[in-house]
Image: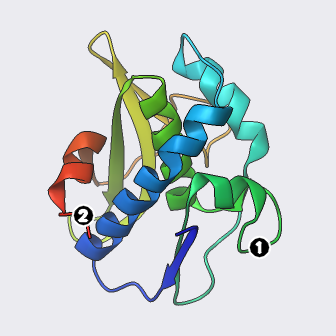
Amino acid sequence: MAVIKKRYTSLDECLKHLRLQIEESIKYADKVTPHFTHPANFFNWLKPQLTYKKDPRGVELLQSMPTLLNNNFYGTPGAGDCDCFTITAAACCMVQNWRTFIILAGRNKYTPVHIWSGVTINGQDYHLDFTNKIPNFTRYYPYTQKLYINEVINKQPKK
């Protein structure tokens, strides 16, 4: 399951597939991700490997980490959008044993327009939005929802 490409139907459906792609990515992340002592170092390692590319019109494209970095939909290593970056970042943060979350952002709870990952270390949140140039920076959205990855992964039954 390297790429999930389908028409967007609902937030719950998207989160289900995001969860599957994170799970699919963990083994690969464990093989290729160096150990980091701070999320900023991780951000500075991964960011140069990523290139922002919008999803095809009318399609929600969710790429696993090995697909995103090696053999992706666009034919360009690292090309994807915020949800592809979030899948990769979440898997990498999980293998670092950091308490990992995702942020859904938009105008309200039901129509997110952006997603990013982050970690909670020593009680402090550290945001990892790979659509930004620097770590721990976020743009303003009227509504944000924080979901810890273990809650997202355990929310839906596995098939």
- Which residue is at 52% across, 50% downward? 25
Q: Distance from label 1 to label 2 (Cα)?
A: 29 Å
The mark found on residue 36 in the picture is: none
Q: Which quadrant holds residue 38?
A: top right
Number of residues whose C-alpha sits closer than 10 Å to that of mark 2, classed few (under 14), some (14–19) or many (20 or more): few
Q: Which residue is mark 2?
A: 158
First in residue order: circle 1 vs circle 2:
1
Residue 35 image offset from top left, x and y in percent: 60, 17
Secondary structure state at the residue bearing disc 2: loop
- Residue ID at (49%, 50%): 86
Q: Quadrant of the C terminus?
A: bottom left
Task: Report the front residue among 139 and 128.
Answer: 128
In the rendered image, the vertical position of residue 28 relative to residue 6, given as above or below: above
Q: Nearer the viewer, residue 73 or 53?
A: 73
Within 10 Å of the Cα at label 1, are there few (<14), some (14-19), or many (20+) other Cα atoms? few
Q: Is residue 33 above or below residue 112?
A: above
Q: Residue at x 59, y 44 (%)?
A: 28
Viewer-nearest residue: 83 or 155: 155
Q: Position of residue 77 (x, y in %)?
A: 80, 57
- Position of residue 13 measured from the top left corner of the image (x, y, whole percent): 29, 75
**Residue carrying label 1:** 74
On the picture, is 55 further left or further right than 49? left
Front of the two marks 1 and 2: 2
Vertical placement of residue 44 versus 92, above or below: above
Mark 1: amino acid: Tyr
Q: Count up the numbered dots.
A: 2
Which element is circle 1 on?
loop
Residue 76 quadrant: bottom right
